[in-house]
Image (tube, rainbow, N blue to C red):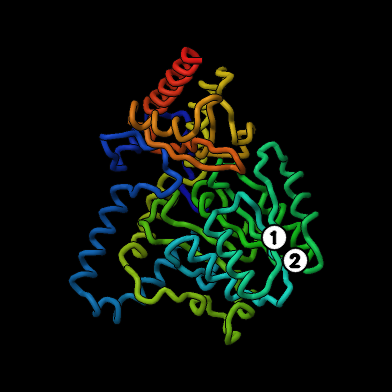
Amino acid sequence: MNQTNSLIAADNDEYWTYLSAHFPSSPAFINLENGYCGVLAHPVLNALQRYQSEINSESSYFLRTRWKEQLLLVKLALAKFCGVDSNELLITRNLTESFASYPHAYPFKIGDEIIYADIDYDSVQQIVTNIAKAKKLALIRLSIANQALSDEDLVSLYEQAITANTRIIILTHLLHRNGQILPVAKIAQMARRHQVDVFVDAAHSFAHLDYQLPDLASDFVGVNLHKWLGAPLGTGLLFIRRERLAEMSATGASDIEELGFAGTFAPAPVLAIADAICFHQSIGTSNIEHRLRHLSQYWLQQLNQLPEIRQHTPDDPQRSCAIRAISIDGISANEVVDYLMSEHQIFTVLRTIGEQDVVRITPHVFTSKAALDRLVMAIKKLVAIQRFNA
């Protein structure tokens, strides 16, 4: 993704401490649940409030005379950032809306198959189930909750599931449950050889990992902008490659806007997308990715010597980034989450991988190493209490 050319070292704590001052934070707790939604940097928050005030004063005049032109400018900024054409992008309210727009428009035939996995986002799985029932499609649900699977294993697993009736593979780029990065480009290239389309859920990887949309090798991608790009809540994105648009439209027109049925929605968050891109680019996606990986490894390596700690994210640092998932032998994940918040004011979240409940821990670029030291201290204290009571 387009970014500053300046290399900022992942361990340059002086710079990252300076950067953290650009983000508001609550003094009441340490936020290590940054995977759900991002925190708007002050310049983006200020822009959002300014846009809201302007739109509120101009009301219908803005929507009828200025909105269309302003929306185009935002789409052009997004297109440059994503490395695609603006006519291939539809701004939505979130990944779920992006994904829901896609299968309803896809030219399925009765008996076509969709392949998806047990680790895909829950609402995506529900949409797949609903659309299969409505359009009389067959479903193949893979189990890939085992983080020990190599990239080659994953490509093979998806390939073995393909049949003559398979039309689509639903594929998550970065798993929300444990932060594992899947080899989506390799799977998409394999699927193309079988004439199977791939829809990539890039909600958690977009602006988190350093890539542009064509790098995913898929004609269909859905994105959340309110996570790692740091755009306001209520902003998402759907990408459909231009050559595929006509078959997705009921009229055969190559206009992606025909797939959007949101009606009137808040313009201010959409306008602030451009400000989020500017702020993000002032840091650089590559720099952000390296810092996030550095932070996740920083706290995790301090706990590696504890035999009670179970990792549920691949050991290879290149197969994950900010998001990690752990569990502690003899203590439920729910107890860990409650303990960290009630006793140490550290906010984390419980997630489930297969039958295993885990604690998902997600720092952001504004997270200090002192905050992560506090996390490590808290977990070590909890383990010591567990040992004493055993």
Relative to 248, say whether 99 is above or below.
Answer: above
Name the residue: 51% across, 65% down.
98
Relative to 372, say whether 141 is above or below.
Answer: below
Marks 1/2: CA–CA distance: 7 Å
Badge 1: how crowded within 10 Å, few (<14), some, or many (20+)?
many
Relative to 290, say whether 188 is above or below.
Answer: below
User: Which of the two discs, 1 and 2, labels the residue nearer the N terminus?
Assistant: 1
**Front-lying residue, 321 or 71:** 321
Residue 201 on image: x %, y %? 57, 57
Tell me if residue 274 can be seen.
no
**Front-lying residue, 301 or 281:** 301
Q: How many marks?
A: 2
Tell me if residue 123 can be seen.
yes
Q: Quadrant of residue 216?
A: bottom right
In the displayed structure image, the side of residue 53 where residue 295 appears, left or right: right
Image marks 1 and 2: residues in contact by CB distance under 8 Å: yes
Tell me the element at label 2: strand
Badge 2: how crowded within 10 Å, few (<14), some, or many (20+)?
many
Name the residue: 63% across, 71% down.
133
Relative to 144, say whether 303 is above or below.
Answer: above
Amino acid carrying label 2: it is Thr
Q: Quadrant of residue 178?
A: top right
Q: Which mark is residue 20?
A: none
Q: Which residue is mark 1?
A: 115
Residue 191 on image: x %, y %? 75, 60
Residue lying farthest to the bottom in this orientation: 251
Q: Which residue is mark 2?
A: 166
